[in-house]
């Protein structure tokens, strides 16, 4: 419980299947658990950042992030060509007091993702953040003013999107190749 720091590659390519990140750890660094066959990861309040490739969600069924989270990167553009089928079916962000940013490519390739719950404190959903993800519906948080490039591109199951009232920009390819999306209400903004 007194742990405050986990280093880069600290548990990379181990046989760990479950891990609990204590409250004192504020940053889950680059490739800390990468290559380990994690099936369960528990995050406690206090975690503020998940860096690129901190862990693989290949075998994890669900992810619930704490309200203290301020930034999550998870995947990267370089990882795109190498992703395997990711088993994660459920992702939830708990509402927090501080702004939260979902970086570019964060959930790229989460083809088995059935449900995503985005918290109201999310201020940015990056480029290609949910590209190729499998969810059927998404409610964009109220603080989002831009849907970035390719954000929901090729989400082949996406049939319902609720856009926030203060949205001002929908970037190129944002919903491209979402073949079952049949209706969307564009806000006056």
Image: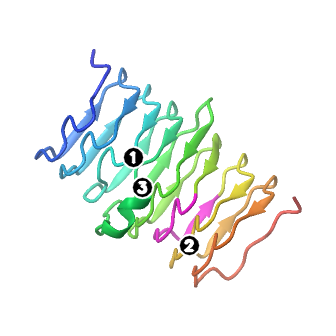
Quadrant into which the N terminus falls: top left
Q: Say whether disc 3 or disc 1 marks the residue closer to the N-terminus.
A: 1
At x 29%, y 53%, the residue is 56
Q: Earlier in the sequence, mark 2 or mark 1?
A: 1
Image point (56%, 74%), residue name:
158
What residue occupies the far left of the structure in this picture?
Answer: 15
Residue 45 within the magenta-colored segment of the rendering: no
Image label count: 3
What is the number of the mark on residue 153? 2
Disc nearer the start of the sequence (3/2): 3
Identify the residue position indicated by label 1 in the image. Answer: 52
Quarter placement of the C terminus: bottom right
Visible in this render: residue 89? no
Seen in the picture, residue 24 relative to 59 is either above or below; the reply is above
Of the two numbered discs 2 and 1 in the rendering, the one whose residue sits closer to the viewer: 1
Estimate the x, y position of residue 60 in percent, counting from the top left. Answer: 29, 54
Residues under numbered marks 3 and 1 in contact, where contact means CB atoms less than 8 Å apart: yes
Residue in the picture at 64% in, 40% down: 121
Element carrying mark 3 = loop
| Residues marked 3 and 2 touching at CB (< 8 Å) | no
Residue at 81% of width from left, 57% of height from top?
A: 168
Q: Which of labels 3 and 2 is toward the front?
A: 3
- In the rendered image, residue 87, in percent from the top left (x then y), is placed at 31, 63
Disc 2, SS? loop
Magenta span covers which residues? 127-139
Can you name the residue that lies furthest to the right here?
A: 188
Q: CA distance from mark 3 to mark 2?
A: 16 Å
Q: CA distance from mark 2 to mark 1?
A: 21 Å
The CA span between labels 3 and 1 is: 6 Å
Q: For label 1, count other residues whose C-alpha is less than 10 Å away and answer few (under 14), some (14-19) or many (20+).
A: many
């Amino acid at each position: 419980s007194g742990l405050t720091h986990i280093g880069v590659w600290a548990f990379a390519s181990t046989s760990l299947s479950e891990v609990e990140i204590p409250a004192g750890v504020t940053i889950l660094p680059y490739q800390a658990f990468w290559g380990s066959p994690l099936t369960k990861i528990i995050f406690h309040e206090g975690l503020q950042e998940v860096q690129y490739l901190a862990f693989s969600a290949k075998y994890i069924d669900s992810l619930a992030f704490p309200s203290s989270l301020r930034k999550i990167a998870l995947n990267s553009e370089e990882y795109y060509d190498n992703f395997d089928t990711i088993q994660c079916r459920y992702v939830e962000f708990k509402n927090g007091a501080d702004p939260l940013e979902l970086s570019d490519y964060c959930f790229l390739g989460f083809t088995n993702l059935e449900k995503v719950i985005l918290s109201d404190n999310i201020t940015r959903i990056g480029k290609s953040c949910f590209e190729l993800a499998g969810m059927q519906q998404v409610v964009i948080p109220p603080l989002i003013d831009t849907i970035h490039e390719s954000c929901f591109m090729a989400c082949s199951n996406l049939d319902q999107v609720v856009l926030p009232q203060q949205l001002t920009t929908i970037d190129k390819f944002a919903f491209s190749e979402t073949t079952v999306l049949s209706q969307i209400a564009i806000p006056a903004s």
